[in-house]
Amino acid sequence: MADKKVKVTLVKSLIGTKQSHRATVRGLGLRRLNSTAELQDTPAVRGMINKVAYLVKCEG
């Protein structure tokens, strides 16, 4: 599981979202629309992705 990666892309604007959701997106390493981050596939990262699933697209 240590070698697995997930690719996360911000596809929806953060305008009008909750402050905690904005912080979660920043924690995933995403800054602006269509920015992409490649992260380790861990339960913590999966939980963050699930929290803001309506804002991001996940691959892998």
Image (tube, rainbow, N blue to C red):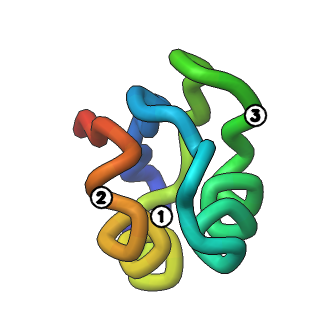
Position of residue 32 measured from the top left corner of the image (x, y, whole percent): 70, 25
Residue linked to disc 1:
2
Left or right? Give the position of 37 relative to 8: right
Determine the CA span between mark 2 and mark 3: 16 Å
Residue at the location (56% across, 54% down)? 16
Q: Quadrant of the N terminus?
A: bottom left
The residue identified by callout 3 is: 31
Q: Residue at x 37, y 71 (%)?
A: 46
Query: In terms of image quadrants, where is residue 35?
Result: top right
Q: Earlier in the sequence, mark 3 or mark 1?
A: 1
**Kind of residue indicated by mark 2:** Ala
Give the amino acid at mark 3: Arg
Spatial CA distance of label 2 from label 1 is 23 Å
Q: Is residue 42 left or right of residue 36?
A: left
Q: Is residue 2 left or right of residue 25?
A: left
* Comparing labels 2 and 1, the label whose residue is closer to the camera: 2
Assign a secondary structure to mark 2.
loop
Q: Nearer the viewer, residue 53 or 5?
A: 53
38 above or below 39?
A: above
Residue at the spot x=30%, y=58% of the render? 53
Q: Amino acid at mark 1?
A: Ala
Nearer to us in this view, 18 or 27: 18
Residue positioned 47% across, 64% down in the render: 2
Q: Secondary structure at mark 1?
A: loop
Give the mark, 2 or 3, whose residue is nearer the N terminus: 3
- In the image, residue 39 sits, relative to residue 38, either above or below, namely below
Mark 2 and mark 1 lie on one chain; the one further toward the N terminus is 1
**Image position of 15 (left or right of 19):** left
Pointer 2 residue: 53
Q: Residue 40: image x %, image y %? A: 53, 56
> Callout 2 environment at 10 Å: few (<14), some (14 to 19), or many (20+)?
few
